[in-house]
Image: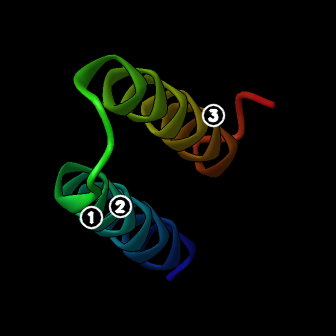
Amino acid sequence: MVGASVLIGILITFLVIILVLYLVQRLPIDAKMRQIVQVIVILIGIISLLKYLAVF
């Protein structure tokens, strides 16, 4: 049962990352700033996924 909750948490985190990246694409900002925001979002997402996998 614990594995299922971890899997659901990872799936929700992944979907939130995809949604935020999509919304960043819709922002009316220049390409360089958009790329910086995307990298930050991806790094935060990777860190949160690693938390679910109990690395941190």
Mark 3 in CB contact with mark 2 (< 8 angstroms): no
Location of mark 3 (residue): 47
Residue at coordinates 44% horizontally, 63% vertically from top-left? 13
Place of residue 28 in the rendered image (x, y in percent of width and height, measured from the top left)? 26, 53
Q: Residue 3 carries which label?
A: none
Mark 2–mark 1 contact, CB under 8 Å? Answer: yes
Vertical position of residue 3 compared to residue 56: above or below: below
The disc, 3 or 2, on the residue closer to the chain's N-terminal end is 2
Q: Is mark 3 on a helix, strand or loop?
A: helix
Going by the numbered disc 1, the residue's amino acid type is: Leu
Give left or right: position of 8 versus 48.
left
Depth order, front residue of 45/41: 41
Instruction: Name the quadrant containing residue 2.
Output: bottom right
Which residue is more in the foreground, 30 or 8? 30
- Mark 1 vs mark 3, foreground winner is 1
Query: Where is residue 53 shown, x and y percent of the image?
Result: 58, 42
Task: Name the one closer to the observer, 46 or 7.
Answer: 46
Pick the front one: 12 or 21: 21
Q: What's the coloring here?
A: rainbow
Q: Which residue is painted at 42% across and 26% down in the image?
A: 33
Q: Where is residue 39 in the image (x, y as percent from the top left)?
A: 43, 23
Which label's residue is closer to the chain start, 1 or 3? 1
How far is mark 3 from mark 2, CA to CA? 15 Å
Q: Which amino acid does label 2 sit on?
A: Val
Query: What residue is shown with label 2?
Result: 20
Give the tally of numbered discs. 3
Residue 34's place in the image compared with 31, above or below, is below
- Which dot marks residue 23? 1
